[in-house]
């Protein structure tokens, strides 16, 4: 049977497949990607912001040391500018600036870890599903569809009620609902890539299915995976914030930005803006920054967009 | 368990907003409190705001566990259907003989009897309240005790062997033993609510009395079934002729299932406290914010409440600052209860730890009640040192309990642990280094290397409880005791806090805080501490004997021995008790205070002045 040539039968951007590229070729490509990314000012500013915020969260406690373990009810809700408390204190008497640091730590750690885990699982499931196709693909994708059909908040509430929230369990919970989108995207890429000549060539030379997926399908889906991972971080931080805002986050004395926001809402009628604005703004800024970075990376990876 | 759950629910509802008591049983108003000057004016409408999601949903005063709530019993049914004895006098948890249907009971210990003589009260249909109405209740509750939320095996009505009508206005109960007179009067006879003959039937069109329950216990099941089914139809509360036969000061004019209701005075009410108001209304709110917004508008609420997070404080003189002082007087509503952490003595992991007195003492030492009351409760709370409340001021609390046997002291907690073979690591992992049962050793069932760590689950009652529980966690950590706190909805906490065996799958809970316990007027709480009924599996034959002595003998020393022993043994980790709510009373409305520590509503005493 003669298979008519169709768009997509070869790498759509004309680039050398990742798995075929030599080391110098790969290096030049990544340099090009970084170059394009660097031209996106919003993405650059966002990246700089995230670096600074990470330094604030992880290095800050070394500079501004506060007790974030023991509560002190004699200094609750002190206003910003109070002696020793630049950003005031919260409803437990914790220094709010120090709280913002450890809350930010948690949000970044859980957000990034959950995104990585979701991306890893989603990419592998999607790649194998798309590569094998047929019944296996149908079953896996129907399962994904089924899970996507469950309201996220319901699933989160259920899971959070079953397990005791710790950083590890929160990473797993958030990843559990996040890998689905990645799987669908990578599966789409795999469906396309599996028809490429270089995949057929690898198969004809005896490459096993797992090796083909891991060495040819996944590497050539990297642009989709990386861009999606960036958005996943933003989404994961939002999901974590949602969980904590609903009171299903980490147990004290741990906290995250959503948890801080939740605590602050208790005093919303008391004018304690410093309990709400800092974590609220931080959540928005982090999520927006990751989204801008994601946009920048998509542009950098997508050759067709570069040509426009 | 059924009984304890029922009372807990009532107590939890009470503790929902956090509340207050008036010092000495009197309100600590905002300096103005609720003045009672000026001659009462007849007429006017007063409105009362329900706490969010806490509205009445049952009108028949024999409540099953499902409906055994403060809102149903104390704030709705009693307006229409009076029990034999009303409690709450001048903010004190005592029976009001003046406002009750009966005179003080007469006990005959030689015959194990108690005689109750009724006052001359009328039902709204013109019939007299008679001994038959009392017997009707007694038969009904005897036949359907398992459908009554107040039932505890061995106590009322099990401890009444017979009831005899002496004459139309006098009834005599024969008991299975002699009981403490005050206890039996305050805690058992106060359950009895005379029921009208119009309810003794089994269908809508039946003749009053045809149900036969008044004369024959065996015929009560059908009557109960009929009445219970009628009570489940909330839409007909104001129109069903059954519920229009009342002996209280109020009749229901309208009722909505959301809790909005209008009461009008019962023109046939024969008690001394006839209503001054033309109407009394209750308003339901879906959230505290909605209620506060309505309160701010100053339009429709006569008696409302502030959220626990409101900007209020209590001065040294006891007066409360009031953010709505232009329109309202602020009065904290103290209630008759205790608050505590419930340990699970049967938990396979930490049960052996809780069984050690020194560990319970250490846990009690790290409860900083003064700081919680001052900081989290803003002064509107009272300490709990034992099974008897310290506020409102009362004659029951012993000097030993008042002295607080285990005051806040992290160092004392550390010392106790170190002296019993623990390697204490403040803010770290404290472990047992000297296992064994002898002096200076950790105790039986505690292996070497065991970590001193507990999981504490508490009900989500808002920021004040968050602060209280976190302060406990924080102070415990300083003493080397790791407490992992987790907040959960009330229903989750109360559902998990069950009596269990170590091998049961539901025995994983360790420490639980569900909001405390609303006491009956005479402060013995056998359900919490007796070997047979303790949710936590507290097992102590001595306390069983002390409970029996306190409820059966008439010696005050027995009550003192009971509370002193429990205060010393700390079977529960005592916690400060918040007030029921920070009540806002519109200016010009009088007679609202002193608020009833049993949380009973008595709007018949409210009035506007001329």
Image (cartoon, helix red, strand yellow):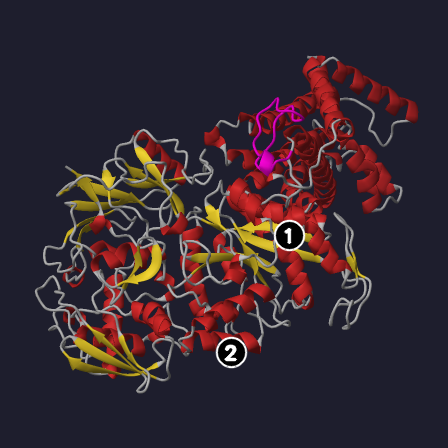
Q: Kindly indicate whether the residues beneath marks 1 and 2 are on one polypeptide chain.
A: yes
Q: Is residue A90 magenta?
A: yes
The tag on residue B366 is 1
SS under mark 2:
helix
Q: Which residues are magenta?
A: A74-94
Residue B247 image position (x, y, % from top left): 17, 62
Residue found farthest to the bottom = B111
Would residue B450 appear left or right of A92 to someone viewing this image? right
Location of residue A4 by image quarter: top right
Closer to the camera, B307 or B495? Answer: B307
User: Which residue position holds label 2?
Assistant: B545
Q: Can residue B269 be seen from the camera position used here?
A: yes
Q: Could you give the CA–CA distance between mark 1 and mark 2, rounded to whole angstroms?
A: 30 Å
Would residue B115 appear left or right of B178 to someone viewing this image? left
Residue B248 image position (x, y, % from top left): 19, 59
Residue B96 image position (x, y, % from top left): 27, 61
What is the tally of numbered marks visible in this picture? 2
Q: Is residue B417 above or below residue B595?
A: below
Q: Is residue B38 magenta?
A: no
Location of residue B455 by image quarter: bottom right
Closer to the camera, A33 or B448? Answer: B448
């Amino acid at each position: 049977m003669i298979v008519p040539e169709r768009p997509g039968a070869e790498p759509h951007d004309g680039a050398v497949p990742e798995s075929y590229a030599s080391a110098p070729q790969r290096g030049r490509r990544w340099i090009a990607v970084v170059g394009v990314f660097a031209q996106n000012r919003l993405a650059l500013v966002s990246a700089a912001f995230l670096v600074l915020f990470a330094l604030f969260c992880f290095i800050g406690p070394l500079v501004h040391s506060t007790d974030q373990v023991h509560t002190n009810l004699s200094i609750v809700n002190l206003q910003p500018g109070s002696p020793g408390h630049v950003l005031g204190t919260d409803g437990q008497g914790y220094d709010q600036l120090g709280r913002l640091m450890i809350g930010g730590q948690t949000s970044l750690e859980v957000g990034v870890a959950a995104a990585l885990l979701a991306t890893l699982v989603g990419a592998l499931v999607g790649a194998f599903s798309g590569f094998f196709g047929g019944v296996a693909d149908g079953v896996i994708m129907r399962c994904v569809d089924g899970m996507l059909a469950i309201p996220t908040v319901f699933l989160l509430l259920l899971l959070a009620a079953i397990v005791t929230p710790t950083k590890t369990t929160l990473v797993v919970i958030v990843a559990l609902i996040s890998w689905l989108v990645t799987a669908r995207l990578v599966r789409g890429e795999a469906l396309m890539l599996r028809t490429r000549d270089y995949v057929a060539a690898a198969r004809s030379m005896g490459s096993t299915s797992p090796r083909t997926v891991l060495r040819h399908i996944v590497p050539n889906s990297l642009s989709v995976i990386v861009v999606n991972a960036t958005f996943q971080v933003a989404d994961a931080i939002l999901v974590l914030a949602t969980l904590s805002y609903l009171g299903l986050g980490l147990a004290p004395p741990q906290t995250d930005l959503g948890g801080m926001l939740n605590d602050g809402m208790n005093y919303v009628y008391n004018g304690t803006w410093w309990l709400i604005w800092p974590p609220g703004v931080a959540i928005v800024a982090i999520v927006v920054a990751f989204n801008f970075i994601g946009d920048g990376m998509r542009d950098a990876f997508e050759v067709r967009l570069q040509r426009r | 368990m059924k009984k304890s759950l029922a009372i807990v629910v009532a107590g939890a509802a009470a503790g929902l907003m956090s509340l207050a008591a008036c010092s000495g049983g009197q309100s600590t108003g905002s300096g103005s409190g609720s003045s009672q000057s000026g001659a009462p004016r007849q007429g006017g409408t007063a409105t009362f705001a329900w706490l969010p999601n806490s509205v009445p949903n049952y009108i028949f005063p024999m409540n099953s566990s499902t409906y055994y709530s403060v809102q149903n019993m104390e704030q709705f049914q009693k307006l229409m259907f009076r029990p034999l004895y009303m409690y709450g006098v001048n903010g004190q948890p005592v029976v009001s003989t003046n406002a009750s249907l009966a005179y003080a009971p007469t006990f005959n210990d030689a015959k194990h009897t108690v005689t109750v003589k009724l006052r001359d009260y009328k039902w709204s249909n013109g019939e007299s309240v008679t001994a038959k109405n009392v017997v009707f209740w007694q038969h009904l509750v005897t036949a359907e005790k398992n459908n009554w939320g107040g039932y505890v095996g061995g106590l009322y009505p099990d401890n009444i062997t017979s009831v005899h009508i002496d004459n139309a206005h006098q009834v005599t109960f024969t008991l299975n033993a002699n009981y403490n007179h005050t206890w039996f009067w305050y805690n058992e006879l106060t359950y009895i609510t005379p029921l009208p003959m119009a309810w003794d039937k089994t269908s809508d069109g039946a003749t009053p009395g045809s149900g036969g329950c008044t004369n024959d216990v065996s015929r009560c099941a059908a009557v109960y079934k009929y009445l219970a089914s009628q009570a489940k139809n909330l839409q007909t509360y104001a129109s069903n002729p059954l519920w229009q036969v009342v002996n209280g000061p109020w009749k229901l004019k309208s009722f909505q299932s959301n809790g909005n209701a209008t009461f009008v005075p019962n023109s046939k009410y024969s008690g001394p406290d006839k209503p001054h108001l033309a109407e009394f209304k209750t308003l339901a709110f879906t959230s505290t914010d909605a209620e506060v917004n309505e309160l701010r508008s100053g339009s429709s609420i006569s008696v409302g409440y502030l959220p626990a997070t409101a900007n209020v404080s209590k001065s040294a003189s006891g007066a409360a600052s009031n953010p709505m002082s232009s329109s309202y007087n602020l009065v904290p509503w103290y209630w008759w209860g205790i608050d505590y952490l419930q340990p699970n003595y049967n938990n396979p992991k930490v049960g052996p730890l809780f069984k050690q007195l020194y560990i319970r003492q250490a846990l009690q030492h790290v409860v900083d009640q003064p700081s919680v009351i001052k900081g989290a409760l803003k002064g509107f709370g009272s300490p709990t040192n034992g099974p008897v409340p310290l506020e409102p001021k009362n004659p029951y609390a012993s000097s030993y309990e008042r002295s607080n046997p285990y005051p806040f002291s992290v160092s004392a907690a550390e010392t106790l642990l170190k002296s019993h073979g623990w390697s204490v690591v403040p803010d770290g992992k404290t472990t047992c280094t000297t296992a064994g049962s002898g002096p200076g050793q950790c105790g039986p069932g505690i292996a070497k290397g065991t970590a001193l760590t507990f999981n504490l689950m508490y009900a989500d009652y808002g920021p004040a409880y968050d602060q209280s529980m976190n302060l406990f966690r924080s102070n415990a950590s300083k003493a080397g005791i790791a407490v992992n706190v987790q907040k959960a909805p009330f229903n989750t906490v109360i559902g998990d806090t069950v009596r269990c065996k170590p091998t049961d799958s539901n025995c994983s809970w360790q420490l639980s805080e569900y909001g405390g316990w609303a006491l009956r007027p005479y402060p013995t709480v056998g359900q919490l501490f007796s070997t047979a009924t303790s949710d936590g599996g507290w097992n102590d034959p001595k306390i069983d004997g002390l409970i029996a002595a306190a409820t059966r003998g008439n010696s005050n020393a027995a009550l003192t021995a009971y509370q002193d022993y429990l205060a010393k043994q700390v079977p529960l980790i005592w916690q400060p008790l918040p007030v029921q709510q920070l009540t806002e009373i519109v200016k010009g409305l009088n007679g609202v205070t002193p608020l009833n520590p049993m949380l009973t509503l008595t709007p018949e005493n409210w009035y506007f002045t001329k």
